[in-house]
Amino acid sequence: MRDLPGRRRKFPLLRQSGGQAVLRAALTCATQWRWPVVPGVGLRQGGGGRPDECGCPHPDCAVPGAHPFDPGLLAATTDARMVRWWWTNRPNAPVVLATGGRGPCAVSLPAVAAARALAVLDRAGVRVGPVVAGPTRWALLVAPYDLEELGELLHNQDWVPGSLRFHGEGGYLVLPPSRTGGGQVRWERAPHRRAADQWLPQVGAVLDALVEASTSAPGGGSRLAY
């Protein structure tokens, strides 16, 4: 259910540093770039030397801190009042982008493969948009695509590594400067901060390089950990 101003929910104890930077980032995404965002569940501090844990109730969470929980993804919005209220109450909640629809889509892959793919695209003169970098995986933001378009593109590939992930309609992606269980998220290639409409490449323009780089990465590019 969507949170409403004036109605406070209880959340796990989250880290309390750098909240203003996260709020500014969430507001920039929502109000300037018109990307719908929602707070991620975040982390709670582990006790007795244990690593920080996901704020959700699942002890074996696969992406600790890096996913929506309450409110859910469908609550993602570009409304400044709602965004400000969320991050005022949860100052270090990760910024989660709802991909597809009104927001960009993305393709993510292991960091080593992504760096290799960016070098190939740069040498070929292919323009690349914003790139999100986590400790083990990077994500290239691309223009919105639908499943039919993506299916045709993938059908034309000889083989698509399982390490490639496609964040389309109904998906999500954690944006900087969020911190998750996998570590700090940053911009490898930042958006133009003052641009109201962020330029994004078509997924077909970058897919060949991403597939090739993932295929030739150590271990076949199969590492999926965030």
Image (cartoon, rainbow, N blue to C red):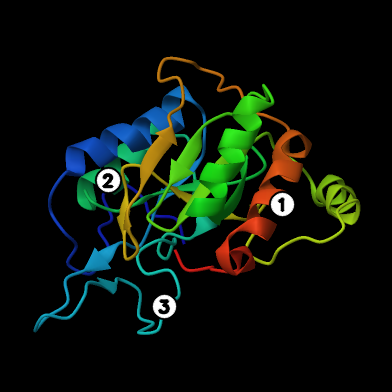
Helix, strand or loop at label 2? It is: helix
Q: Specify the quadrant of the image occupied by residue 222.
A: bottom right
Q: CA distance from mark 3 to mark 2?
A: 23 Å
Q: Quadrant of residue 180?
A: bottom left
Is residue 201 or residue 196 the one in the foreground? 201
Pointer 2 with pointer 1, Cβ within 8 A: no
Mark nearest the camera among 1 and 3 is 1
Residue 121 versus residue 173 in the image, above or below: above
Three-letter amino acid code at the position of disc 1: Val
Name the amino acid, label 2.
Answer: Trp
Cα distance between the residues tagged 1 and 3: 28 Å
In the displayed structure, 17 sits above or below 13; it is above
Question: Residue lying farthest left?
Answer: 48
Q: CA distance from mark 2 to mark 1?
A: 37 Å
Nearer the viewer's eye, disc 3 or disc 2? 3
Pointer 1 residue: 211
Tell me what residue is drawn at x 28 percent, y 32 percent: 24
Relative to 39, 217 lies left or right: right
Which residue is disc 3 drawn over? 61
Choose mark 2 or mark 1, whichever is in front: 1
| Residue 17, position as x, y percentages in the image | 13, 49
**Camera-side residue of 83 and 14:** 14
| Camera sees residue 225 | yes
In this rendering, would 28 be left or right of 172?
Answer: left
Q: Earlier in the sequence, mark 1 or mark 3?
A: 3
Give the crowd class for mark 2: few <14, some 14-19, many >=20 residues within 10 Å: many
Taking the image as shown, residue 139 lies to the left or right of residue 156, namely left
Task: Kindly tell me whether residue 10 is visible in this rendering.
Answer: no
Q: Which mark is residue 87?
A: 2
Secondary element at tag 1: helix
Earlier sequence position, callout 3 versus callout 2: 3
